[in-house]
Amino acid sequence: MKKIILVFCLIFCFALSKAQQSLLFKIKYLPDRTYQSNISFDMNMEMNFLGDSVTIKKIKESGIKLPMIINSETSMSMLIKTGSAKPDNFFPIALSYKNIVSTKTLNGNETPDAPNPLLGQTIYGRYSLDGKMQIDSMSGKSMDDQFKNSIKTVIDNLVNQIHFPDKPLSIGETFTQQVPFNLPLGGMNMQFNIQIIYKLISIDKESAYFDIDESLNFDMSTQKDGKTMQGDGTGKGDGKLVYNIANNFPTSMNTNLNFNFKMQTGALTIIAKAKMTSDNEAKINGN
């Protein structure tokens, strides 16, 4: 009898431990919290042109040094504060941009971006317990609907950057997300999707940990100034994600992606290789 009870207890404990390793993930802001976020995105690219000697000579005579070394760095710091929930299930939310820096260099020559109009401003609104956002004003000033919608999109993107499945995930399970990416090149925007696979690695009392696998493949053909431009490229990368269970929010996400592409326009071929890195860290405190 004792052996039967022991076996039953072992089976129960095993089933309980397996259940505890499964979790439903949601990302949303909670009332009475302070979120301090620091975001950075860097891209380093080497680009070269191949073609007949006359065409290449003209490119160099225009002042372009080959290969072109292009670096882009963006960093942003923001503070989001939420208040207590009201009877209508909404609570106040305020977002302040503390720092926004963006620089670009071409062969070592820096091209600074214009100051961001949101720097130093505070945006006020309401947020619901089920994740709905309403924007009211900015630093006490009224805003038109278009500006409100653009700010709402920024905040929604912070929350919806990861689309978790609507079912609990167990350790070892994965889910896949397609993220659009836009790369300006020669007056043209190259648009393609980055595929991201998240794999749940472990869960402890405070956090859940994911490995990230990134890849991209694109094949495009477009018209510019009456010329056909055709291109293709591939990329591969990885990263890590840490999700805070109590706060329903990611506290750390970092990725890196290496890719290369080739563009053909007439007799000119553009080849490039690049590396993109991103880091997103968040500290969450109760008010």
Image (cartoon, grey):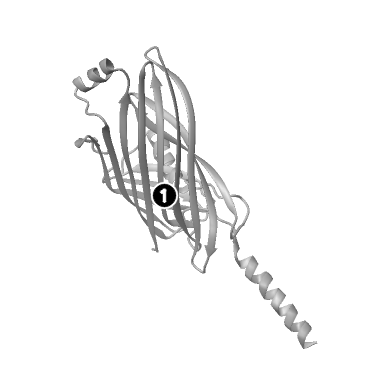
x and y, in percent, of residue 56 in the image? 26, 20
Q: Residue at x 41, y 59 (%)?
A: 33
Work out whether 2 lies above or below 81. Answer: below
Horizontal side, residue 110 vs residue 257: left or right? left
Instruction: In this rendered view, identify the residue nearer to me: 275 or 154.
Output: 275
Instruction: In this rendered view, identify the residue nearer to me: 5 or 168.
Output: 5
x and y, in percent, of residue 250 in the image? 45, 56
Among the 4 quarters of the image, the one containing residue 115: top left
Q: Residue at x 26, y 35 (%)?
A: 69
Instruction: In this rendered view, identify the residue nearer to me: 151 or 16.
Output: 16
Horizontal side, residue 246 vs residue 143: left or right? right
Q: Residue at x 26, y 15 (%)?
A: 54
Most extreme residue toward the bottom, as rendered? 2
Q: Amino acid at mark 1?
A: Thr
Q: Residues within 10 Å of mark 1 (few under 14, many from 20)?
A: some
Regarding residue 160, the answer to whether it shows in the image is no
Among the 4 quarters of the image, the one containing residue 235: top left
Most extreme residue toward the right, as rendered? 1
* Residue ID for mark 1: 255
x and y, in percent, of residue 167 in the image? 63, 53
Q: Secondary structure at mark 1?
A: strand
* Figure disc tally: 1
Q: Quadrant of the N terminus?
A: bottom right
Instruction: In this rendered view, identify the residue nearer to me: 83 or 152.
Output: 152
Regarding residue 183, the answer to whether it shows in the image is yes
Horizontal side, residue 119 vs residue 35: left or right? left
Q: Residue at x 48, y 51 (%)?
A: 212
